[in-house]
Image (cartoon, helix red, strand yellow):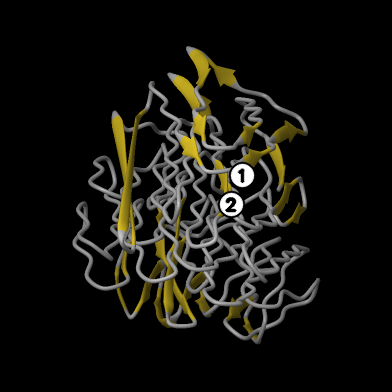
Amino acid sequence: MLPFINTVIVVQYSSGRITTGTTSSGRITTSTTSSSSITTSTTSSDRITNSTTSSGSISTSSSGSVTTSTTSSGSVTTGTTSSSRITIGTTSSSRITTSTTSSSRITTGTTSNGRITTGTTSSGSVTTSTTSSGSVTTGTTSSGGVTTSTTSNGSVTTGTTSSSRITIGTNSSSRITTSTTSSGRITTGTTSNGRITTGTTSNGRIATGTTSSGRITTSTTSSGRITTSTTSSSSITTGTTSSGSISTSSGGNVTTTTTSSSRITTGTTSSGRITTSTTSSDRITTSTTSSGSISTSSIDSITTGNTSSSITTSTTSSGRITTSTTSSSSISTSSSSSITTSTTSSGSISTSSSGRITTSTSSSGSSSVTTTTTPAAVVTAMTIC
C-alpha cells in the first residue's frame, strides 16, 4: 500500500449549477466545466470511440464524483472533467483505442516503499501506461499539486492530475492509444513518500522537470499563479488539474492549459472547481481512470469542494480556437459537428447540491447529443460514444 499520509477528504459541493458543456467542432473541441458537482462534456466528431466508465473501482473512468468527458474528433478531442473526484474524459478517434484499467495499487515499473515510480508495478493490477490513484496523472502525479505532461507522436498532450482528485489527460496523436489506470494509489513516474514526480520528486511536491514545494510546474511555476505550462499547488497547468479540479488537455499538436489556484486564466482550473481546456488535434485518444478514494500525503495542496468564483476555459487547437467560458454558476454548452454524448451517473450520489443544474447543449450540423448530469458527491459517469 502506498504510504500516503493524511487522507484527503473529498467534499464535493455542488453549489451554483452544474454545467454540462460539450463543444465539438471541426478540429477543436473545448469543454469547460466548473462546479463542484460533475460536469460532463462530450464531443465527438468523425469516427470516435469513447468508452469511459467510472465506478468505485475504476475502469476507464473515475469514481466518486466523476465527470466523464469524451471528445473525439477527427482532429480534435477535448474532454474536461471537474469535481471532487474526477474522471477525465476519453477521446478516441480514427484508429485509436483507449483502454483503462484500475485496480488496487498499480504502477508500471518500479515500486519503492509503498511508493510507486514510473515504470513500476506494485501489487494489484498492472496498468499499462500510467496509473495513479489518489492522485493520478498520466505523466506525472504528485500528491498535492501535480502537473503532468505527456506527449505522444509529435503531438503534445498535457494531462495533469492533482492528488485528492484525479485527472488524467492523455493525448495521443496519429494512431496512438493511451491507457491509464488508476486505482488504489498509483503514480506514474517516481514516487517518494507518497508523492510522485516524473523526473524528480521532492517530498509532497512533484514537478515534471522542476518541482517547487507545493507547486508543480511543467515548465515554470510560481506559487499562487501560473503561467502557460505552469502549475501552482492546488492548481495545475497545461493539462492541469488542481486538487478537486481536473483539467485534461490533449492536443494533436499543442495544447496549453494554465491553471492557477483561486484564479483562472485562459485554460485555467482553479481548485474547487474545474476548468478544462482541451485542445486536441489529429487523432487523439485519451483514457483516464481514476480511483474512488484518494489519499495524499500533502493535504495543504489539496483543495476539494472549493469553488472559485469564475472559471474561464479557453481551448486552442491548432489552426482553430474554441473558447468556452463557464462561470461556476453558469453553463454554456456548444456542440457542433456530429456529437454523441452519453453520460450516466450512477453509484451512490450524495450531494449537497444546492442551486440548480443547468444543462445547455447546442449542437449544430448533424449531432446527436444526450447529456445526463447528476450532481453528486459521488458520481459515476459512463460515456460511450
Point 44% across, 65% down: residue:
281
Residue marked by disc 1:
68
Left or right: 134 as drawn, with respect to 18:
right
Left or right: 157 as drawn, with respect to 284:
left
Q: Is residue 15 visible?
A: no
Characterize the local packing of mark 1: few (<14), some (14-19) or many (20 or more) Cα atoms within 10 angstroms.
Answer: many
Label 2 sits on what residue type?
Gly
Q: Where residue 250 appears, x then y in whole percent?
A: 46, 63
Label 1 sits on what residue type?
Thr
Q: Where residue 183 appears, x then y in whole percent?
A: 70, 61
Residue marked by disc 2:
89
- Spatial separation of the CA atoms under disc 2 and disc 1: 5 Å
Left or right: 145 as drawn, with respect to 78:
left
The one of 161 and 253 positioned closer to us in this rendering: 253
The image quadrant of residue 55 is top right
Query: Mark 2 or 1 closer to N-term?
Result: 1
Point 56% across, 33% down: residue:
38
Query: In this picture, is 302 found above or below 147?
Result: above
Point 68% across, 45% down: residue:
63
The one of 116 and 198 positioned closer to us in this rendering: 198
Q: In the displayed image of the protein, which residue is found farthest to the front?
A: 365
Query: In this picture, is 310 found above or below 112?
Result: above
Characterize the local packing of mark 2: few (<14), some (14-19) or many (20 or more) Cα atoms within 10 angstroms.
Answer: many
Q: Is residue 185 visible?
A: yes
Q: Where residue 365 appears, x then y in whole percent?
A: 52, 37
Question: Which SS class for mark 2?
Answer: loop
Mark 2 touches mark 1? (CB < 8 Å): yes
Q: Quadrant of the N terminus?
A: bottom right
